[in-house]
Amino acid sequence: QQQVKQSPQSLIVQKGGISIINCAYENTAFDYFPWYQQFPGKGPALLIAIRPDVSEKKEGRFTISFNKSAKQFSLHIMDSQPGDSATYFCAALHYGQNFVFGPGTRLSVLP
Amino acid sequence: NAGVTQTPKFRVLKTGQSMTLLCAQDMNHEYMYWYRQDPGMGLRLIHYSVGEGTTAKGEVPDGYNVSRLKKQNFLLGLESAAPSQTSVYFCASRGPVSYEQYFGPGTRLTVT
């Protein structure tokens, strides 16, 4: 099945807190797992990505944790800022060709 | 370097009308994608192309056709628009080695 599940649907975090978004998949043919950030009226933009041979990747305040055996991966945003308020999508690349997206999480960071 | 551009930005169609959405990229990318975005459903792949002259169906291809006659352009056609095709359409491209997708700004289509 080419499906990626994502939770929660929406998330409210205080400034300085940690935002955590989770994704899960079934298809073992997925070989790359990116996270996209989308602001209203704009196209999605790549935030951070991981390959399945790595368990964690950190870029600044953003970290992906990847659990291959559980077929789960998550995005952690440390020290969340109001400017991080956006919709976040996880995705998975199928056999290096086409992407499958999760339904998205709307993050609101309160000042 | 404009990246990925989409034409038009907005369009209103009546049921049964046809139109073509144009996506252009100036990064010499092999892969190009058309997605639709609907509230609560993320981005769903309509069609994609792995190189000039190739196309393949995605998750939701019905009612749409595509063409990739030139490497830099990927056209999405609606032959007979239906209200269910009201959506925001995004085009994206990426190179053959890097998996990073670059998205266009989107086209908001309303079918009445």
Image: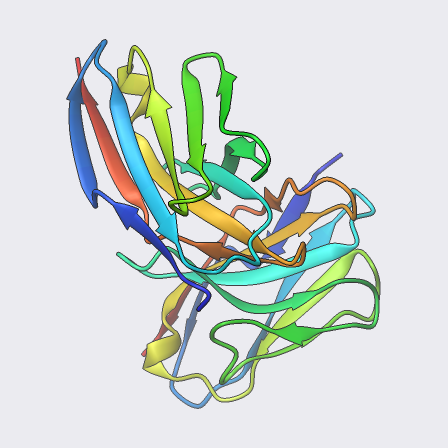
Looking at the picture, how far across and down is residue B94, in whole percent?
Answer: 70, 47
Residue B13 or residue B56, whichever sits in front: B56
Instruction: Please tell me which residue lies in front, B1 or B48.
Output: B48
Q: Determine if residue B111 is in view.
A: yes
In the picture, measured across the screen, residue B34 lies left or right of residue A65, that is right
State the residue at coordinates (75%, 62%): B50
Coloration mode:
rainbow
- Name the residue at 79% across, 56% down: B72
Q: What residue do we see at 42% from left, 29% from top? A: A65
**At 37% from the left edge and 30% from the top edge, which residue is drawn?**
A75
The reply, left or right, for residue B77 in relation to residue B15 is: right
Q: Residue B21 in the image: x percent, y percent?
A: 59, 67
Where residue A89 sits: x, y (%)? 39, 43
Q: Nearer the viewer, residue B81 or A28?
A: A28
Q: Quadrant of the N terminus of chain B?
A: top right
Q: Observer-nearest residue: B85 or A63?
A: A63
Q: Is residue A41 visible?
A: no
Most extreme residue toward the front, as rendered?
A69
B29 in relation to A62, above or below: below
Q: Quadrant of the C terminus of chain B?
A: bottom left
Q: How many marks?
A: 0
In the image, residue B98 sits, relative to residue A109, either above or below, namely: below
